[in-house]
Image (spheres, grey):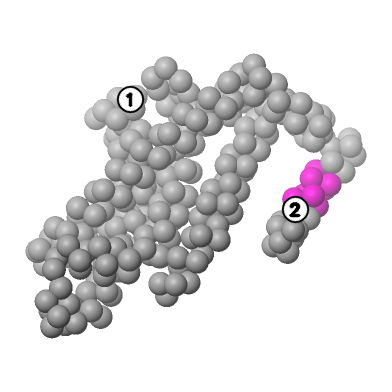
Amino acid sequence: MDRKWCIKIGFIAFLLGCWQILAYSGVYPEAFIPKVETILVRWWHLIREDHLLMRVAVSLSTIIVAVAIALALSALLILIGKKSYIVKECLKLSASIAGPIPGIALLPLIILWLGLSTEAMMVILIHAMIWPLWTTLDLSVTRIHNRFNRFMHAFKISRWKRLKDVYFKGILPDLLTGIEVAWGRGWRALLSIEMIFGIVGNHSGLGWLIYERRMYMDTAGMLAGLLTIAICGIVFESVLFKSKVVEVHRENHY
């Protein structure tokens, strides 16, 4: 087994051990600090009877659609910015203004304008994702343009080959990093929104599950929901974004 995974598993075991010691100490009631086995039993119960996997699928499908839209809009803004200096400066100012604003702070306005709808949720998610994604990709495109622009003109490389072989391959490491950052911001925003929006459409996500468990004073259920979120985070951060294939791409391009 890889040394990094051994360290991670050991750290998780340490945290679980500390939790168990606190749970068995009797300092807090079990309703506040349930035992690990109680949380795991509740987690399995949520999977079997409360459609936990369906809730995970709903949240993941929402965030994937939002990432795709934010990526497409970022590419469009970069193309427009390359055509117009004024537009690019306006986009930089917009990123400086809107980037630091958390999506949840815009929630009252979005609800006022669009109501409790899927469209409102998507607007907030795209706001959370698009600014770090656009900033990362714009800096990458600018760096590549400054480095290879004279070379491309000297050898009269076609526009399609510029886009495919120079720009796309050149920004790939930054693209992966930008998607990773956007995913993290969007994932946190999504769970917060779901806890406030409740059920939007025919299904509900992980955020609503946690809020629902809180209403029933089901501490073990809330912790089971947090455990599911943690597992999703580990899968996407350690398996997808930090996979060997992704790392090889980054090393080859840097």
Q: Quadrant of residue 149?
A: bottom left
Question: Residue 89, position in %: x, y?
Answer: 17, 65
Quick one: quadrant of the C terminus?
A: bottom left
The residue at 15%/73% (across/down) is: 157
The amino acid at mark 1 is Ser
Indicate the quadrant containing the N terminus: top left, top right, bottom left or bottom right. Answer: bottom right
Q: Which mark is residue 117?
A: 1
On the picture, is 254 further left or further right than 12? left
Q: Is residue 214 magenta?
A: no
User: Vertically, is 120 above or below 127?
Assistant: above
Q: Is residue 142 above or below residue 209?
A: below
Between 173 and 11, the one nearer to me in the picture: 173
- 15 or 146, which is in the foreground? 146
What amino acid is labelled 2 in the image?
Ile
Q: Is residue 39 above or below residue 106?
A: above
Check disc 2 and report the residue beneath it.
9
Residue numbers of the magenta segment: 12-19
Q: Residue at x 10, y 63 (%)?
A: 83
Secondary structure under badge 1? loop
Q: Magenta region, mostly helix, strand or loop?
A: helix
